[in-house]
Image (cartoon, rainbow, N blue to C red):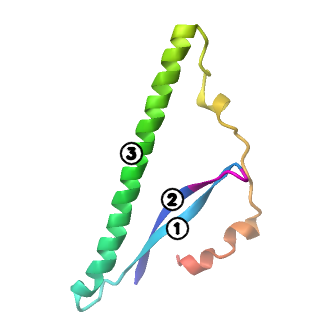
Amino acid sequence: GENIFLWGLRYKPEGAMFELWQENALLIKPDIDDKLEALPSFLQFFWSLKHLITESAINFGQLRKENNERALKSTLSNTTLHSSFSTVVNSSILKLIEDEVKAGFHVLGP
């Protein structure tokens, strides 16, 4: 069978970085005789996907609200906002050693 993975990003405050987190996985068996056997796992996977999309939409809405409030305060106080996103976000990137990146990925399949 084939696997579909649902990944999320988790913020790690102790390292001030984000890491990939496997939220769910779905095993697809195209040659399964009883399609009803696979239904519960499909429902669970897509319910998780729906929940994460809803959570993301709420978070984006909150970010937009905060951005609008800051823009209004900036306009009222005659201060300037950062000129670009890169001036706000710490652009340091953690570069992983090639062996560390490859370690464990063989388990996930092709």
Measured as percent of width and height from the top left, residue 50 is found at 34, 59
Within 10 Å of the Cα at label 3, are there few (<14), some (14-19), or many (20+) other Cα atoms? few
Q: Residue at x 24, y 92 (%)?
A: 33
The residue at which mark 1 appears reads as: 22
Identify the disc placed on residue 61: none
* Residue 68 inside the magenta-drawn segment: no
Asked which quadrant contains residue 9, the reply is bottom right
Q: Which residue is mark 3?
A: 57
Q: Is residue 4 visible?
A: no
10 Å neighbourhood of mark 1: few (<14), some, or many (≥20)? few
Q: Which residues are magenta?
A: 10-15
Identify the residue at horizontal 74%, vertical 54% (top origin). 95
Q: Is residue 66 above or below residue 81?
A: below
**Res 8 label:** 2
Residue name at image x 36 percent, y 58 percent: 51
Task: Determine contact: label 1, label 2, CB under 8 Å.
Answer: yes
Separation of residues labelled 1 and 2 (CA atoms)? 6 Å
Q: Is residue 75 visible?
A: yes
Q: CA distance from mark 3 to mark 1?
A: 19 Å
**Looking at the picture, how far across and down is residue 38, in whole percent?**
29, 83
Q: Quadrant of residue 65?
A: top left
What element does badge 1 sit on?
Answer: strand
Give the amino acid at mark 3: Ala
Cα separation between marks 2 and 3: 14 Å
Q: Secondary structure at mark 2?
A: strand
Query: Does 3 sit left or right of 108 as displayed?
Result: left
